[in-house]
Amino acid sequence: MPHVDGPELDAFRHTYRAWLAEHVPPDWRAAEADDPVAVSRAWMRELDGGGYAAPGWPVEHGGMAASLAQQIVMFEENAAADAPPTGLFGIGLNHAGSTLIVHGTDEQREHLARIRRGDEIWCQGFSEPDAGSDLAALQTRAARDGDAYVVNGQKVWSSMAARADWCLLLVRTDPSAPKRKGISYLLLDLRTPGITVRPLRQITGSAEFCEIFLDDVVIPVANRVGPENEGWRISQTTLSTERGPFFLASVHALRDRVRDGVELLRSTPGPDGRPLANDASVRQSFARDAGEVEILAELYSQVLDSQMRAGHAGPEASIIKLYYSEVLHRLTGHLVDAVGLAAEVDGATLVDHLGSWGMMIGGGTNEIQRNVIGERVLGLPREPR
Amino acid sequence: MTDVGLDDAHAQLRDLARKVFADRSPTTAIRALADDTLGFDPELWRTAAELGFTGLEIGEEHGGAGMSFREAAVVLDEMGRGLVPLPVLSSVVLGTGALLAAGSPAQQAEWLPAMAAGERRLAVAIGPDRHDVRVAGDRLHGSAPFVLDAHAADGLVVQAGGKLYLVPLPASGVTVTPAPMLDRTRRLADVAFDGAEVEPMPGSTDGASVVDWLLDRAAAALALDSHGGARRAMEISVEYAKERVQFDRPIGSFQAVKHKCADMLIAVETTRVAADAAARDVAPRPDGPRRWPSIAKAHATDAYAFVAGAGISVHGGIGFTWEHDMHLFVKRAKLDQALFGTPAFHRERYARLLLD
């Protein structure tokens, strides 16, 4: 991982470590079993009390204007102190936060404090059944009626929508304009009448994603971010201003999977009764995958380093996303293949492998990432679209 | 992204090496050496020595630059890029490494100044392929097939029974027979020992650790060669995909070609970080174990073979001709995979650190 040391960072690390030691609730894991949302909300409130809730935000919005290096330090210290998770607030802190800070009205920016304090969980209503990779083809219609829009349509792949309070919504306000020109960006209060949220069960059996059905939902014009029909541009800044060590948790988790894989292969007997860790072909594939995890961690650390210098993420993010998801897919797939029927019964290894398809599709499919790499990194000509 | 980790001095060294190799060793010159007995251009070797490339890691007291493998890595990367046929891996990386780690003060004083000056070269017979050399008294017996650049060496470093021995050449009891090669940018020879008289290298008494370090240096060097070659093969292919028009469009606009090029970039970038990490890992002296050289050797040489092979596919029929340079990359990549331990050999080596 990148070099995040030096006297100032060390001082920051010690201050934050001391704060965590005093504030992480000792019994939060027990409480989480009953009500994970309440635990997460309470921890956000605690973090905000210390000024740590939204490290990447500017100071005037209650953030710390923390450098990427400081955010990496905080990630490491959170993990070391076993602090409660804040993933439910990810869309609020990243997508909603960066969009409202850049494009929001003063009134809209009042959401920022509520996100920090754990009062508002946000989700994202961008994709639709007929607008996936081709997001600009979205059809959800918003008809202007005085100082409100009346919205009808359907959204899909909205992470955490079943637990969310608010939603970042892309809608079509001008059906006659070319597809990127007729889109507006709205903030939707999920308590508004006419909304049905239905969890979408995934191949892993869990249901993080939801469908959102919108039936004559009334949204005040005051909840529009930016000018009418300029929502596409704003959605692009939402995605490109994503900051912070986005894949750090994933890369750490992948290293943990390698460690778990070592234990699995040592403890699972193969057909000859000896541990799989002694099998020559298993050793080959595991060494290949584990080596690739090390290479990914090294590559990601360099990408973070160059982000720290340049101040923004380049198209390298596509390389990380693509490589990360495929290394995860290979590692888990080879472990499943190695343990055979035990994977069917124990379940966890196979579920990990099934989950890897989500990583290869979510956040822009790997096929789209290959287009991005081909065109923006290698300068190959665009295909006609 | 390519310049991450390169400081200014390294960037200057890289620019210098790239220019020298481009000017003095274009593929037309490399092709002209295909049937040459020596297999490299002695004038280019002299130039490399004058520029200090042959003595980067040799101390100033022995006429070298007193630098580290990090600097040698820059030159190795550029040699890969240019498919350059010079006995650098054999003599500069491994011969020098063996002397630095295991040579007696007298051996170092005798060999290092001449090696820094490019006046003498060492080849190294340490296996791992079918290496079968025994020592009896101060005499060597047995055979070492596939010894890199033995045909052009003034001496051999030989592993026998876990220790290293030095044999000045020519010597009675040593037969060097050049092997026919498909890759014409490097030369291997079969070496047979029949009672050759040898000097022990005293620093190798703890044996395995020096040999492991040399194998790691070879692995890192081949990973760097693979990065340089793979990146160049990718650049040539991407340029072609932008220019070549079929169905009224540049073929690089088709996803089937574009995605292949994207996969080439992933292979090249992952190879870059692995090779850099391996170079950092072997820069200090022998104490092991090191995980990066084997990770990098397996990954980088496989990646190079993939990229060069995909390069032929992107070019279509023209890529299959002798006239086009892509097969030079494919052949060097295949030799990089096999030299000093196949990818499977190095994965097993890493598996021992992981699983045992």
Image (cartoon, helix red, strand yellow):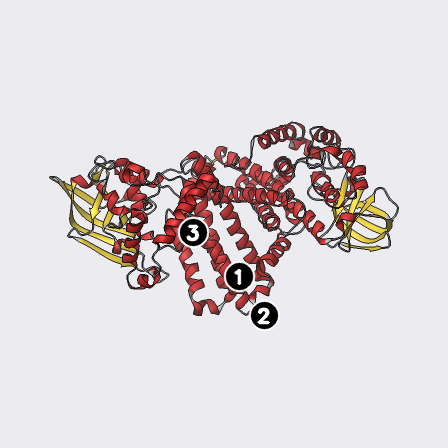
Tell me: residue B39, above or below residue B19.
below
**Residue B247 in view here:** no
Q: Judge left or right: residue B26 versus residue B122.
A: left
Judging depth in this view, the residue of B206 and A92 nearest the camera is B206
Judging depth in this view, the residue of B266 and A99 nearest the camera is A99
Judging depth in this view, the residue of A150 and A262 nearest the camera is A262
Q: Residue furthest left?
A: A146
Residue at image mark 1 = A262
Between disc 2 and disc 1, the foreground one is 1
Q: Are marks 3 and 2 in contact (CB under 8 Å)?
A: no
Q: CA distance from mark 1 to mark 3?
A: 19 Å
Tell me which amino acid carries mark 3. Answer: Ser
Residue A1, position in %: x, y? Answer: 49, 46
Q: Chain of mark 1?
A: A
Density class for disc 1 (Cα within 10 Å; few <14, some 14-19, many ≥20) is some
Judging depth in this view, the residue of B201 and A287 nearest the camera is B201
Tell me which amino acid carries mark 2. Answer: Arg
Residue B87, position in %: x, y? Answer: 72, 38
**Residue B284 in view here:** yes
Q: Secondary structure at mark 3?
A: helix
Q: Do marks 3 and 2 share a subunit? A: yes
Q: Residue at x 44, y 68 (%)?
A: A346
Q: Secondary structure at mark 2?
A: loop
Q: Which of the marked residues, 1 or 3, is nearer the chain's N terminus?
A: 3
Q: CA distance from mark 3 to mark 2?
A: 32 Å
Residue at image mark 3 = A250
